[in-house]
Amino acid sequence: MKRRNASGRGPGFRNGALILLGILVILSVGCESVFGPDAAEDTDDDETEIARIIITNNYDSDLDIYMDGEFQFTVLDEDSKKIRDVELNEHELEAKKTGTSTVVDSETIDVTAYQDYTWEITDPPDIQILNSYGIPLKIYLDGEYLFSMVDEETRWIMDLTFTRHFLKATKVSDGKEVASTTINVEENTNYSWTIQ
């Protein structure tokens, strides 16, 4: 009586396993090691090193980004984008309101090494005004009336553009000018004017 193989694995199974093992060996010969790149490879090649400028837009508006006068991309509000492969040099960056020539911020970045540099564009510049003149005043910006202030009141003029702004204060009672100033808004920071 012939005995049956209890495992059900006859010579056909062994042959199939050997063929499968052979195919795996042949395929693995041309493949990179599962343990990483070949040790002989040079991973410190200078040509692969790059500098990048990472720009974050927190300006509350979409912005067009320029580097050295050349348009790079549009970055949406509360988003970040990267200028890649930046040359080692000093670079002038500008952010303009999308589709306009209105500059809302600028920055100079001296790229001296192959690394990441960052530029965050924050909310627009503001002017804080304090009325210490002793009487209620009317405030004008570039010839347009903005608001009135009582004595010792502080108010803000928000979201100014980068340019020279002329401020004037007049008496509420008779409209006579009591003070004026020109503020050159050239940085993304807050400015102040105290009327005395």
Image: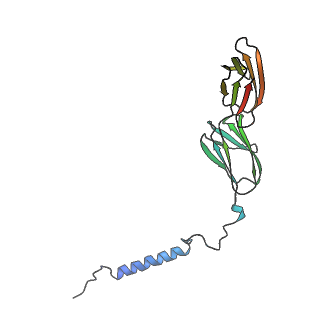
Toward which corner of the image does residue 151 lie, by quadrant? top right
Q: Between residue 13 and residue 179, name the one nearer to us.
A: 179
Toward which corner of the image does residue 144 lie, by quadrant? top right
Q: Residue at x 57, y 70 (%)?
A: 36
Outermost residue to the bottom: 1
Q: Between residue 75 and residue 9, name the one nearer to us.
A: 75
Whole-percent x and y of residue 183?
76, 29
Q: Which residue is drawn at 72% across and 63% down?
A: 46
Q: Residue at x 51, y 73 (%)?
A: 27
User: Where 88 falls versus 144 (above or below)?
Assistant: below
Q: Total of numbered circles in the picture? A: 0
Q: Residue at x 60, y 43 (%)?
A: 79
User: Where 70 falls versus 20 (above or below)?
Assistant: above
Q: Between residue 115 and residue 74, name the one nearer to us.
A: 115
Quadrant where the C terminus lies?
top right
Whole-percent x and y of residue 107?
73, 43
Whole-percent x and y of residue 170?
73, 17
Q: In this view, does 117 lie to the left or right of 2?
A: right
Outermost residue to the left: 1
Q: Between residue 75 and residue 164, name the one nearer to us.
A: 164
Toward which corner of the image does residue 18 lie, by quadrant? bottom left
Quadrant where the N terminus lies?
bottom left
Colour style of the rendered protein structure: rainbow
Whole-percent x and y of residue 172?
70, 14
User: Where 1 falls versus 84 (above or below)?
Assistant: below
